[in-house]
Image (spheres, rainbow, N blue to C red):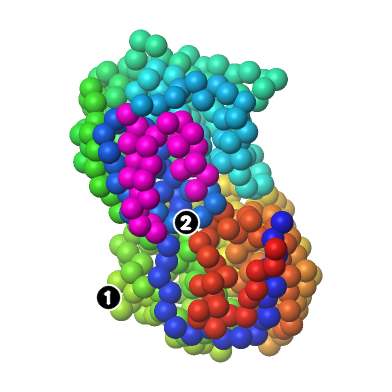
Amino acid sequence: MATFKIEGGHKLNGSITPQGAKNEALQVICAVLLTPEKVTISNIPNIIDVNKLIFILGELGVKIEQLSSDTYSFQADDLNLEYLESEKFKKDGSSLRGSIMIVGPLLARFGKGYIPRPGGDKIGRRRLDTHFEGFINLGAKFRYKKEERFYGVEAPNGLQGTDMLLDEASVTGTANIVMAAVLANGVTTIYNAACEPYLQELCKMLNSMGAKISGVGSNLLSIEGVNNLGGCELRVLPDMIEIGSWIGMAAMTKSELTIKDVSWKDLGLIPRVFRKLGIKLERKGDDIYIPAQDSYEIQNFIDGSILTIADAPWPGFTPDLLSIVLVVATQAKGSVLIHQKMFESRLFFVDKLIDMGAQVILCDPHRATVIGMNHQSSLKATTMVSPDIRAGISLLIAALSANGTSTIHNIEQIDRGYQDIDKRLRAIGAKIERIK
């Protein structure tokens, strides 16, 4: 288990380029299983979760070639499907929640797909019903071996297009069902589909491979099944969650920072929410410029009531940034209610912030009230353990602003979502050390 040692209180300065989007990379890498032809993907982040998925595809028999530091080619023309029911796959797949998205492509192309019960963040229940109900609607039969915690779907006679209404606008669920439906017989209509930019990129990728998907960018998708798909080339979008993380770091450390090539059109509400916290953001071309601010004041609602920031399916505010918004609010002027609707345990890291001197009231598993200290009283350094990716980066942001030297254990959780975060922080002035 590795540890970060962070000496807080130092200002950052310079420019930073966000990595490729983790959540998009996991989807589009799984999509290479839909074709025997070569697929080339660039701007792939070098992070634990993505590397685990690439490893699993390699074990499955996908021919993988690393063309540069962030570019890979994949060719799934000779797969070893027996690996899917092996003990090794149960171990490999159970450590990565994103591995669930190999099921849809395998089911579509080979008539069967299996997955061990996946792991990932400890942020409450994250059920898989949407995925499997979608497959069942397409005509697959569900298998579950409870004693082995192993899921499977089979459709030896192929999948049949149908109309379905998803019980939740699950991003990975929508991606999985779309990848299954592109090779089904007939037309599939998906209501209440997720429409995040990364899912839009997946649909555009599939269309470039020969799929027939309409309604991309909306919550109503129509998919006309085709017999086969070809190869393509794709560049992954910048990671909006990392972009939000850098904004939070700049605000908390009173730093001047430029975030390069952010793809503004795909950021949705993110700039607006940070501006509601009083943080100044300037658009310069496709960059975000954040000037140094000694103070930032939370905007109340028009009637004077306390601001509430809540997550929602796209185009609402992404839940992955609520932890960062909460930390940033601890040093704002004013108060805010953070309402985490989609995951019931994601706010439980606030006890660590309270230990550091933050004024946070945890109302229940979904809501926390933050009373900002306006940088009048700095957070105090402490020793912490990272519980998940987003809480981990939030604690790191807190440590960068704190007085003294903090220690964060279990930083593998942060490494799952952030590429070389310590090296990149040192390059812009942070005092951070990785201890193994």
Name the spot of residue 4 as percent of width and height, x first: 68, 68
Label 1 neighbour load within 10 Å: few <14, some 14-19, many 20+: few
Name the spot of residue 349 as percent of width and height, x first: 71, 59
- Left/right of residue 275 with respect to residue 395 in the rendered view: left
Of circles 2 and 1, the one toward us is 2
Q: Secondary structure at mark 1?
A: loop
Which quadrant, please, contains the C terminus? bottom right
Name the spot of residue 192 as percent of width and height, x first: 40, 37
The residue carrying mark 2 is 46
Task: Answer whether residue 60 is magenta in the image.
Answer: yes
| Type of amino acid at the residue the image marks with label 1 | Gly
Residue that appears at 72% across and 83% down: 403
Q: Residue furthest top?
A: 157
- Between residue 72 and residue 182, name the one nearer to us: 72
| Type of amino acid at the residue the image marks with label 2 | Asn
Residue that appears at 57% across and 47% down: 342
Can you see residue 367? no
Can you see residue 145? yes
The residue carrying mark 1 is 285
Q: Which residues are magenta?
A: 51-77
